[in-house]
Structures are given as C-alpha cells and as structure tokens.
Image: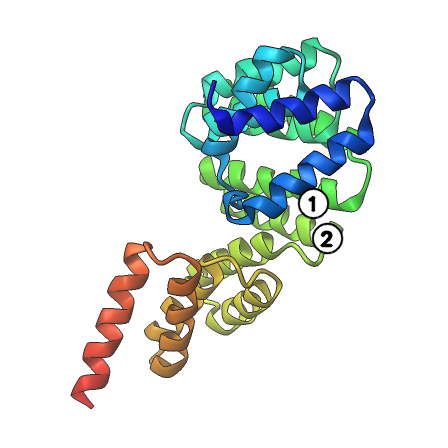
Amino acid sequence: MGSEMEPLLLAWSYFRRRKFQLCADLCTQMLEKSPYDQEMNNISSAAEYYKEVLKQDNTHVEAIACIGSNHFYSDQPEIALRFYRRLLQMGVYNCQLFNNLGLCCFYAQQYDMTLTSFERALALAENEEEAADVWYNLGHVAVGIGDMNLAHQCFRLALVNNNNHAEAYNNLAVLEMRKGHVEQARALLQTASSLGPHMYEPHFNFATVSDKIGDLQRSYVAAQKSEAAFPDHVDTQHLIKQLKQHFAML
C-alpha cells in the first residue's frame, strides 16, 4: 500500500471509532500539507483511493459510487451499472442513484430500464436542483435518440426547476443554433458562461457562432476564454489560429 494512503486510512479508522475530532484534525493536516494534490474533478485518481477504501470497508457507499462514476466517464457504462446496482442491493434509494442508473442504462443500450430509472429519480427528487439534473440528463437521452423537440422541452424543464443550470443553458443554445436562431443562442450562451465561467463549452460555442456571423472580435475573446478553461481543446486551438490569420490579413 502506498504511503500516501496511510493518513487517509488512519483518518478513516478514527472516524469508524467515532473519534471525530482526531479524524477532522488529520484531514485538515493533509489538506494544508498538499493542497495542490486535491485535484478538482480528478475522478480517476479519486477512484484509486476509493479502491483502497473498499479493501477496508466493502460497503462504503461513497467509494462504490465514485468507482462507478469513474467507469461511466471511462466509457464503461456496463461496468458502472454493476456498482450502482450494488448500491441498490445495499438499500441506497435516492434521486442521484436512479439518475445515474438511467444514464448508464441508456449508454449500455438497456433501454427498457432507462425511462423507469429516470421516473424513479424524479419521484425521489428532494428539491428543484435534483429535479433539474434529472431533466437535464433526459435531454441528453432525447438528443441521443434524435428527438430534438423532446430535448428542447427537457432542457427547458431543467431551467424551470433551476434557472442557474449553466449546462442546460449551453445545450439549449446549441439547439437554438441548429434552428438558426443566432441571437437567441448567443444570449443563452452568455448566460451559461456567466453562470459557469469554468466551463469551456459556452465560450467555445459563443466563439463559433460569433465567427459565423462575422463578429470576429467577440469570437476571439470567447475563444481565449475557452482555451483558458480547457487548454488542450483542439477545436478551440484551430479557431484561434484561424482568427489570428484573419486579423493578420486586415
């Protein structure tokens, strides 16, 4: 076992023995010692730690859920399903679990369980934010089956439940772009980028649509924001290069 796991396991041992203050103190020390190791959205790294946790406690709900999520985002929805179904067998029954089950069933082509899972997720939603996430995922399913009208309705319902849902604004804007509603799409993308400045998609989409209508300055500014959020995004790099070439010709 790696030495980096030892403090985590010791903290977990304190927690299991109800020595909460010792657990909290140790966790604080770990965060202060190496704050840059706490990488945001580093699911793969987190999954490795959680696998070690499962060796100590094979019923650890958060560990099972994290490993399932890692398999899903690694394009392994069938394996993710095993972990989520294990949580069901353990008695976990909430909106988030059925929401994840719905997505996994869809991408694993188990369509008979997809809508049932989302229906249960909506029924179990404890607040509007949870309901919004379910409608947002249903929108993805609708896009996947090619029903853009249904997708539009789902993303709208996501915003009805949570009008700060940046991802829903972004996806709704993409649908409006497909309809040729340029100004409406740009307004939605501006809202999405202000609500989620860490996301590259609204910036890139705004840059793309601005480039198409000849608003090159705004396109360039948005493309730079997209690059800052996701430096390795190839399409953003190509757009910036194209815009620089155009500016050089002026």
What residue is at 65 percent from the left and 12 percent from the top?
57
Question: At numbered mark 2, what does the secondary structure look like: helix, strand or loop?
Answer: loop
Q: Position of residue 165 (x, y in %)?
A: 65, 54
Q: Position of residue 219 (x, y in %)?
A: 38, 75
Circle 2 crowding by C-alpha within 10 Å: few under 14, some 14–19, many from 20: some
Figure quadrant of residue 210: bottom left
What residue is at 60 percent from the left and 57 percent from the top?
166
What residue is at 49 percent from the left and 56 percent from the top?
175
Q: Are marks 1 and 2 in contact (CB under 8 Å)?
A: yes
Q: Position of residue 248 (x, y in %)?
A: 19, 85
> 49 above or below 236?
above
Which amino acid type is shown beneath numbered disc 1?
Answer: Ala
Figure quadrant of residue 154: top right
Residue 112 visible from this viewpoint: no
Q: Quadrant of the C terminus?
A: bottom left
Q: Position of residue 15 (x, y in %)?
A: 76, 23
Left or right, 219 with respect to 184, comes to left
Label whose residue precedes the other's in the sequence (1 or 2): 1
What residue is at 59 percent from the left and 15 percent from the top?
54
Left or right, 18 with respect to 23, comes to right
Figure quadrant of residue 222: bottom left
The disc label shown at residue 162, or none: 2
Check disc 1 and report the residue beneath it: 132
The residue closer to the viewer here, 242 or 168, is 242
Kindly report the distance in space between the C-alpha atoms of the residues bearing marks 1 and 2. Answer: 6 Å
